[in-house]
Image: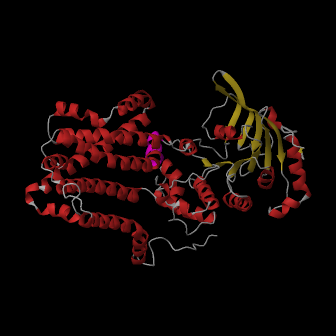
Amino acid sequence: MLTTLNTGSPIASGQPVTDAPPPFIHLKGVRKVYRQRGQEFLAVSDATFDVAEGELITLVGPSGCGKSTLLKILAGLHGHDGGIVRIGNDRQPFDAGRDIGMVFQQALLLKWRRILDNVMLPAEILGLPVKESRERARHLLALVGLAGFEDKFPYELSGGMQQRVSIARALVHDPKLVLMDEPFGALDALTRERMNIELRRIWQDSGKTILFVTHGIAEAVFLGTQVVVLTARPARMAARITIDLPEPRTLDIKTHDAFGAYTREIYGLLGMH
Amino acid sequence: MADTAQATPGTGNGEAPRLAMQLGRMGPAIGIHLALLALWYAVTAWGGIPRFILPSPVDTVATLLQPHYNWGMHIYITTIEVFGGFILASVFGVALAVVFSWWPVTGRTAMPLLVTLNMIPKVAMAPLLIVWLSYGIVPNIVIAFTICFFPIVITTARGLREVESDLVDLVRALRGSRKQIFTKIQLPSALPYIFSGMRVAAVLAVAGAVVGEFIGSERGLGYLMLQVQSSLDTPAMFMCLALISAIGIVLYGLVVFGERLFVVADARLD
């Protein structure tokens, strides 16, 4: 069940020569050090994993394990101090200034904009054609279950609905990679479960590659095609686990033996027996 | 969940019931003002207080009918001073805060100086300003300006600072320009702060202008107040006070109206 790094794959020894498509994201030995008042501390070390195109990969770990830092490195907002970060491949080229969608713990909608105009923000930043983008924004609002809310203001929506809007916003410019930093962390438990199911559906409908950061172990297993487990002290990558659960995933699978085994394994890796 | 359950604002139900409801909510507020007016009248009518100490509301309003006070001209002058000082302070105050936010080093350098200067009681500077700028409208506009300026700079600078860093990241990840961050996120999110600074300034502007008129002026309601004081014309003094307050209320009302217009209900600071 536990896929240790580089198991039998030729990827470790340079370019793959097999028929397998090259990974969409390739991270190898990624390191990030923060310096503060002359002191150094390690935010990320030896992060090594590959993500295939169209995967929903979850990163799980306690606070301070460098999950968010890793996302910022992938978003091109932070540099890294060592290792390889490669996004995109020949078949699926990646434009670093364009192909990123971001969702945060807070929906961070612009209070003064109506919902449709909030979704439009990335399209405006990139200067995409207005008419097509608005069409797409409407379509995405329907996809996240908010058709009819286009002309509302954010304060008229519940927390869960606001987070749906921010997911639509992350998709409006049709990015190839969507980074989600604990997007459901501020929601109540029931809304969170509902959003998990919704996200699986949105992911399948949109076909995007999604990196999802969470500190919820059950959430990570439920959502992910793979789970990357990170530990805090020291900040390092503990394991990468491929999740093999029946599809479509419904809340029922949380009672499956396999689901329990995965979560137990991750608790173990995080030193929580 | 996807259905629009509630009616969208502005459709159906008409405006009339909403207006009636608003008036209903304002009822107690209007009531207490009328009650004070009635109490004032009662005290003057039956309280045996001399007219030169406390004139009745009727006496006070009656002064408006006497042309020799030249109310119109004095109201006009004070209004120009109040609005002039306030508008200048709003324009330059916001502009300076924008400069501070765009080039943080200017803010770090100049802000401490502004805080120090702000410690000088602006009213106490009035005699000096009159020496520099001579009598008339200009020094009074400047006094109103100096008194309005600081609250606007400080609240605007704060509003421009309090921008969500994650939102800025979102724009930067798409290689958004500084200008885009400013116009699409920073400035609109600072608007509630700007208006809250302007509300404070609106109240101060009137005080600034009138103090200027007390000290050196030949026109304006503050000047008139000193004139009528010398002849113990208390009803006219009351009227001056009422008109000065009215100018302040109009200015404040305009600021609140602008805030309603430009700032979403949810984002307003109170």
User: Is B5 above or below relative to A105?
Assistant: below
| Residue A212 placement (x, y as % from top left) | 71, 48
User: Start and end of the magenta stretch?
Assistant: B177-185
Location of residue B92 by image quarter: top left
| Residue A104 placement (x, y as % from top left) | 63, 49
Location of residue A267 by image quarter: top right
Relative to the observer, which residue lies in front, A65 or A203? A65
Which residue is outermost to the top?
A38
Q: Is residue A245 left or right of residue A74?
A: right
User: Is B3 above or below relative to B212?
Assistant: below
Q: How is the image coloured?
A: secondary structure
Q: Is residue A117 left or right of residue A99?
A: left
Relative to the observer, which residue lies in front, A52 or A244? A244
Q: Residue at x 51, y 44 (%)?
A: B163
Is residue A19 visible in the rendered structure shown here? no
Relative to the observer, which residue lies in front, A40 or B216? B216
**In magenta stretch: residue B237:** no
Location of residue A45 by image quarter: top right
Q: Residue at x 37, y 65 (%)?
A: B32
User: Is B36 above or below relative to A216?
Assistant: below
